[in-house]
Image (tube, helix red, strand yellow):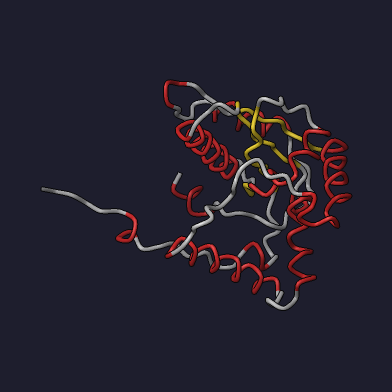
Amino acid sequence: MSEAVATRRSIRHFLPDPVDPVVLRRVLDKARAAPSGGNLQPWNSHVLSGAALARLCEAIAAVLPLGRAAHAPEYPIYPAALDGRYSASRHEVGEAMYAALGVTREDKKGRLAQFARNYRAFGAPMLMLVHMPRYMGPPQWADVGMWLQTVMLLLREEGLDSCAQEAWAVYQREIRACVAIPEDHILFCGVSIGRRAADRPVNGFPVSRVPLEESVTFVEA
């Protein structure tokens, strides 16, 4: 478990090697043991590969040139008032990623090209789309997060990698046109699944974590 936690990271360049669906089914079957309040198990997902994944990627590629006019996010991905160390962490990891890619702040075309790779699942052979009933609240969103972490760690156990991408929710209209996600469900994220291209700098740049003292307070008396 410690090894899985230490080696899991968001992979943004996958090898094209197919993932054995039997392996993924085993991972998802084990992940059913993830905790949830009241045992609601609010997670739902569709797993796409092959022609189905290719159709979805092409559908989004067709509207990408429209820019923000084509966006229809299901929810605000970041708080509007994000500040302090939270804002600093987001900025830092973004700059580290683009530096690893050799893309400067002034290279708008390069940054847009990397953004577009989100919607090719970074080359992964499988994409899992995660959704839940719209009436679910923050506690159930947390439950889905615990399930996702369980899935991603079990993928590491199988020698596989992943990238959880809330960016897919921006194009939920195109996704719903390709995938039968119930209208009364909210699309939370996509999870790209495959094997990392270990030699790619975008998969190896440092990702800092705040010191334990900044996020945890021990109370003894």
Foreground pick, 52 / 155: 52
Query: Relative to 121, does residue 129 appear above or below in the rendering?
Result: above
Query: Relative to 210, does residue 189 appear above or below in the rendering?
Result: above
Residue at (43% x, 65% y) in the render: 84
Query: Number of marks in the image?
Result: 0
- Residue 92: image location, x then y, percent: 53, 69
Residue 184 is left or right of residue 124, and the answer is left
Query: Relative to 119, does residue 50 appear above or below in the rendering?
Result: above
Q: Quadrant of residue 148?
A: top right
User: Among all residues in the image, which is located at the extreme left?
Assistant: 221
Residue 85 is left or right of residue 197, and the answer is left
Residue 40 is left or right of residue 200, and the answer is left
- Residue 93: image location, x then y, percent: 56, 65
- Is residue 193 visible from the viewing direction of this image? no
Residue at (48% x, 49% y) in the render: 5
- Residue 66: image location, x then y, percent: 84, 55
- Is residue 215 visible from the viewing direction of this image? yes
Residue at (59% x, 49% y) in the render: 77
- Residue 193: image location, x then y, percent: 69, 44
Foreground pick, 181 / 54: 181
Residue at (68% x, 45% y) in the render: 73
